[in-house]
Image: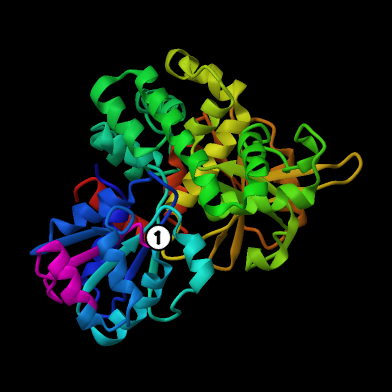
Amino acid sequence: MKRLIDYYLNSWKNDHYRMPLLLRGARQVGKTFSVRKLGESFSEFVEINLEEMPEARVVFEKNLDPERMIAELSAIMQQPIIPGTTLLFIDEIQVVPRAITALRYFYEKMPKLHMIAAGSLLDFAIEQVGMPVGRVQSLYMFPLSFIEFLVALNYTILLEEILSHDPEKEISSVIHDKTLALLGDYLALGGMPRAVKLWQETKDPLTCSKVHTTILDAYRQDFDKYAKKLQIKYVELVFKNIPVQLGRKFRYSLIEGEYRKRELAPALDLLATAGIAHKIFHSAGQGAPLGAQIDPQDYKVIFLDVALSQVLLDLDVAGWFSDPRAEFVNKGALVEAFVGQEMLAYDDPHIKKNIYYWHREARGSAAEVDYLMQQKNFIIPIEVKSGSGKTLKSLQLFLESHSSTLYGVRFSTQNYSEYQKIKSFPLYAVAKVMSNKNLELNNAMKLLVGK
């Protein structure tokens, strides 16, 4: 399965100044698969899973001399580990946090060795031992984006047409309708790699739904690995309530029961650290950087994957296949969450990114813009309309009150168009918009389609 991360992994491989790499992201987003695929381009690929191999854990519990560690790991694996020709992959590295500390010594004393580490709960281990600053690089992974989904289903020619299309002109209605139908499939199935793989093979939504249930169960089983015993019930409560509150400011008071914010807020932070939840912070949006103007107590929350959200809500996804146009209208909060998921997937993966929104709470003049995007020193407001999207009062109000903003973006089921300071894109064109922010994304997309 081809992924955008392949481009960034190959760039890391060929970078003369590379450092040991931490591949970060939630459980089951495809980290191990992508590293194994990169390993095929090396003379030797050595994979060590610290969760499955207790004998390898001992290697990192002694002194952190790289030559000793490599010699012992080679003996355990019965494979040579040769700097310059071997890719060494340490999976589930969070099991031995001291192994994260060891990465700095590989960088300092064995810089020619290609070394990648990953783990489903890696960020919790980093909180324990700290990041070897200036000695380790990171790449962040997410579920398959919509364009990766299209490639997985062999719609490469269609994708090339979308990516090369001039946004100042309408796209063919045939292509537009076909792509919206496929987007409906994606919103039903989501981007978890195992579910997409089964859809390739079976075209059976029920089989995919079982995979989603299994993934959610795995996330629940992880709760006791990073939450204290007394916190687990709060983590479960927040876990179930994130999809319920999609599209609006997250309020702990809406969680049923006699619970206090001081009990529930740490639970949400744990889910965010695990990569399962993403906060969308309110920002004044008056200029760059957006993160300098946030209210840390004012945020919306989206779940890792739109399909997992629907399973948690016990929603019937059949409508996405039979009448996607109606579903776009009826499930506006989910469509908004999809755009946020896409924005994360297409941003620069070297840095953990936040996403932002804007609102004004004034009597008789309340307004909300779904997302804000920083492109160099400019702020671009983004409105998501699940239907035709003809009413854009909030977007227009933002443009009027933020004079330095050049234009706004609307995503909807409508075709490309432009009117005054508002550029309209179809919902399937988030990658096109994000490529103006993350210039490397253009190269990643070319590799994805085989160019």
Q: Residue furthest right?
A: 363
Task: Say if 214 sits above or below 376 in the image.
Answer: above
Q: Mark 1: which amino acid? A: Val
Question: 68 or 449, which lies in front?
Answer: 68
The residue at the point 10 percent across, 65 percent down is 79
Image quarter of residue 174: top left
Stretch of the chain drawn in magenta:
69-93
The answer to whether residue 256 shows anywhere in this view is yes
Q: Read off the residue under disc 1.
A: 95
Image color mode: rainbow
Which residue is depicted at the point 40% across and 60% down?
A: 95
Q: Is residue 200 above or below residue 39?
A: above
Q: Residue at x 41, y 43 (%)?
A: 143
Q: Is residue 444 magenta?
A: no
Q: Position of residue 117 (x, y in %)?
A: 32, 64
- Secondary structure of residue under mark 1: helix
Q: Residues within 10 Å of mark 1 (few under 14, many from 20)?
A: some
Q: Residue at x 44, y 41 (%)?
A: 429
Answer with the quarter of the image where residue 374 lies. bottom right
| Side (left or right) of 325 relative to 379 | left
Q: Position of residue 54 (x, y in %)?
A: 29, 59
Rendering quarter of residue 273: bottom right
Near-viewer residue (419 or 353): 353
